[in-house]
Amino acid sequence: MVRRPSRRAYAAQWLLLLAVLAVAYLVVADATDNLSHRNLSFGFGFLADRANFDIPFHVISWTESDSYGRALLVSFVNTLLVSAMGIVAATGLGLLLGIMRLSVNWLIRNLALVYIEFVRNTPLLVQIIFWYFAVLQTLPPPRRSIVIPGGLLLNIRGLYVPSAVMADRASILSLLSAAALVLTPLVWRLPLKGGRLGAKALLLPLAAVGLFAAGIEHIEFPTLTGFNVTGGAQIPPELAALWAGLSIYFAAFIAEIVRSAIEAVPKGQHDAARALGLSTLAVLFLIVLPQAVRIMVPQLTSQYLNLIKSTTLGAAVAYPEIFQIFAGTVMNQAGKEVETIIIVMAIFLTVSLIFSAFMNWYNSRIALVER
Amino acid sequence: MTMQVPMRVVAPPSGGFGGSPGSSSLIVDWLRRNLFSSISNTLLTLLVVAAFALIVPPVFNWAIADATISGSDRSACTSDGACWTFIRLRLHTFFCGHYPDSELWRLALAAALMVAFSLPVLRDRTRHRGLSLLLLLTVFPLLAGTLLIGGVPGLPYVDTSQWGGLMLDIIISFVTVAGALPFGILLALGRRSELGVVRSLSIAFIELWRGVPLLTVLFMSAVMLPLFLPHGVSIDRLIRAMAVFTLFNSAYMAETVRGGLQGVPAVQEEAAASLGLGWWQIQLFVTLPQALRIVVPGIVNNIVDLFKDTSLVTIISLVDVLGAVEQALKDPAWLGFAKEGYIFTAAVFFLCCFAMSSYGRRFERRLNRYRTG
């Protein structure tokens, strides 16, 4: 700003604040008035009430006699689950597509281009609904399941994947495994006589995987017995459709971020690495991508946040995430329209703020320190 | 995967010494460079071709060769292919909802007006782009609104509950852009303001709307907003949805415009101030014209996003094109055509959005040319 704002401007801003407060007051007054006309009261006490409805898919335990508060937790975990699955799959697929966009092979390059253009210009909701109603709901019944190599079964009830049956010793072993993962970054930067341990610390996550695997009693494959599938873990079609929709849609956006980030890495880096005799794969993964990640992080953050917010579209296919359960079932059943929407909004707002704070911290950590 | 990233490999010299640069050698040269430049590349090419050979014929047979498009009822669709008859018979509901047949000319006229008003804004070389934009965002909505709603002599009243299909998506998008663009610009200016209260309010507004999913906001408009109005007052459901769409998208517009404002050198404002211009004059005549020019591609992206988002109104039971397709799919006489229905919906959205994003890219290229030239 060039000049200090005038005194009149300072006065005007307080008027604006007054106006905003007045509107807020009117809205609250109207809401109280309306609620009293409907004999409703405002309050979050209902969270302790018995829920009496079923949540068909839950990661943590759920029974109909649990409270609305528990339902909030169960559905929130469902939201987090599909968000995490979506972020992982979209990043992997996006990375692959972004690299394909820069391939020397004309076919590969344009295949990725067509994918990105088509997916980006079609609404996510239409895609999710397409996967659910036009693909997954038209699959054969269990006894005519489609067998996918690797022990997977696909039918109208969802995707059945092999699951691990854990032995008694598993709890201790997975704790150790988690500890190994947590320690990795610390060990990485451990000051030693001959410099830092560095990449040798990557042995720890490897050990973690080993420890975890040691806790597995055996792998259980889903098998067809009569008209039903037994064994294995079931991914219900609602989750599968939402997951597929989110991953495929956001992969297209991430691919463009990856492509532009790779193109933004100075060409000299690539040439220098080639001159040192590194293979094309090594150049990509050891030289170009680590530098590209720095450029990607801010844009990736906003895509991840979009993805988390978009999990609410699961409501269209009845995946029991927080919006579907709270702004749907609970709102109708408990008649708490204002409270349920406030809860859902507050949760997403909190998740957004925490997530962007974390990504900002990560960004400042990996950002180039200019001297 | 080929990993010659990020550089394209330079073409190996083709033809040797004796070769003449005939057209056939050009093709061979292109093929060798783009498809068969190395062993791994050749393998990849063959893999992709094999995948195509596996996937394309069944898809082609389903969508075109075995498909049906003629006929007037379900019995026409007996083959294994797609049943486009279903789409063809319902096309007018998908595009116009339940707008009365006798009044369809009003829709056509409104569409023609939209093209007439947008052309001067979209053309490459145009004298009064700002003025045309102002007309498009003020005069046109008034004209089109009167035309579509009616209730004036000569134009019978059509209730908004009869609006639907693609027309509803376009109307919601248009109203949203007309509202969110000016409001977003104000918010972006507010966020950079020296006035603490204005800045805090702008930041709070922007971050609040950007932090929550659109679906919760739409639900708020459908369920909660009636509670916030004085007792006995009610607002049309469509207008409520448009209102929250506008507020929601103005937060995103504000962030896009802010990027443009940051791209205008500070000396521009200083020079304008030294000429004695006031704050509003500086913003209106110096900063904004430069800032908005930079962010046109970003704004086009925002518009594409919000156009795609209009499909969400289906969930609060307004019948846009997706809603119209879903309704049609529930018709007992036409059960089991989900694939056709949703592929059609996706195609409609794709055509609209692809056209818009192509325009945005073209504008961006033009912009870059001027900047470097």
Image (cartoon, grey):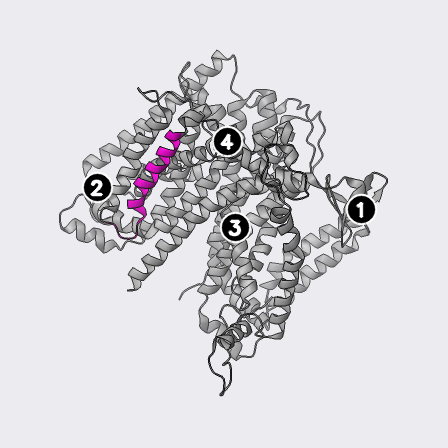
Q: Which residue is mark 1?
A: A222
Residue B231 position (above or below residue A69): above
User: Which chain is home to disc 4?
Assistant: B
Looking at numbered disc 4 in the image, what kind of residue is underneath it?
A: Thr
**Residue A99 percent across, percent down from the top left:** 54, 62
Q: Is residue A40 above or below residue A344?
A: above
Q: Are marks 4 and 1 in contact (CB under 8 Å)?
A: no
Dot 3: chain letter: A
Task: Say which residue label 3 marks.
Answer: A118
Q: Tag 4 or tag 2, which sits nearer the N-term?
A: 4
Please give the residue where the numbered disc 4 appears in the rendered image.
B93
Q: Out of B61 and B228, give the one closest to the viewer.
A: B61
Q: Nearer the viewer, mark 3 or mark 4?
A: 4
Q: Which residues are magenta?
A: B105-126
Which residue is found at the position 51% from the left and 75% from the top? B24
Q: Examine the residues drawn in magenta and state their main secondary structure.
A: helix
* Residue closest to the eye, B349 or B104: B104
Mark 4 to mark 1 CA distance (whole Å): 45 Å
According to the image, label 2 marks what residue? Answer: B280
Q: Is residue A335 magenta?
A: no
Three-letter amino acid code at the position of disc 3 = Phe
Q: Amino acid at mark 1?
A: Pro
